[in-house]
Amino acid sequence: YSGKTPNKVIAEKLHRIKVGEVKSVPVVVSEHCSVYDAVVTMFIEDVGTLIVVREGGILEGVISRKDLLKITLGGQDIHKLPVGVVMTRMPNVITVGPDDSVWLAAKKLITHEVDALPVVRPVEGGDKNKDLEVIGRLSKTNITRLFVELGEGN
Ligand code: ADP
């Protein structure tokens, strides 16, 4: 017997599982995408958060359901309005890396009160903190799915 408490065993496990093992495919749009097309994309792709990228898949921002709801109350033409005007823009986007633990990702979701995080890596030869390439999406659903799998005890 290792002498570890059950909670310690769970904690160690959650720190060992990496974001890269549980992440989903990112659903991305350009910042020139209209608010209308962003809403359609959310329905078609069945996600609650769209990630906004420029050429090369470089992170520019994120758009949530409420961002889109809010802008539709403004009475502007959502066919013409680009998502760039409503998104949460870099450097204010909370991200995780593929080698970060799922625990850290869950902690960020709770601390910053958001539903999803872009999974990013620094662009080779780019500005280390400014240019982040989007390689995935980590949402509350990923955490819940992992919770269910861990609960099955296999
Ligand atoms: P919803 O708006 O559907 O409740 P969120 O709680 O995720 O979804 O979003 C709340 C606000 O936080 C929105 O304005 C959104 O743009 C912003 N947001 C969402 N995800 C992130 C993130 N990873 N980093 C920074 N801001 C985010």
Image (spheres, rainbow, N blue to C red):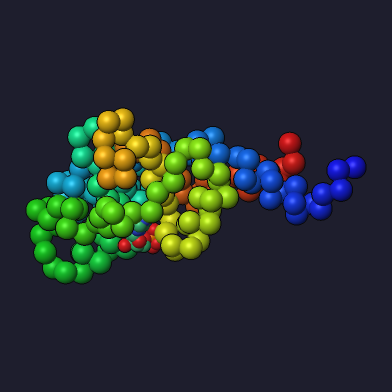
Q: Quadrant of residue 2?
A: top right
> In x, y percent, where is residue 29?
24, 42
The quadrant of the rendered image in which ligand 1 is seen is bottom left
> In x, y percent, where is residue 33?
17, 46
> In x, y percent, where is residue 98?
47, 37
The residue at 38%/37% (across/down) is: 121
Q: Would residue 18 be visible to someone looking at this image?
A: yes
The residue at 14%/46% (across/down) is: 32
Quick check: 1 left or right of 21?
right
Quick check: 105 left or right of 71?
right
The residue at 12%/55% (across/down) is: 81
Tell me the quadrant of the picture where the C terminus can be found.
top right
Between residue 66 and residue 133, name the one nearer to us: 133
Q: Quadrant of residue 18?
A: top right
In the figure, 152 relative to 124: above or below?
below
Between residue 118 and residue 141, name the one nearer to us: 118
Between residue 3 and residue 142, name the one nearer to us: 3
The residue at 90%/42% (across/down) is: 1
Q: Would residue 46 be visible to someone looking at this image?
A: no
> In x, y percent, where is residue 130?
27, 45
Q: Quadrant of residue 28?
A: top left
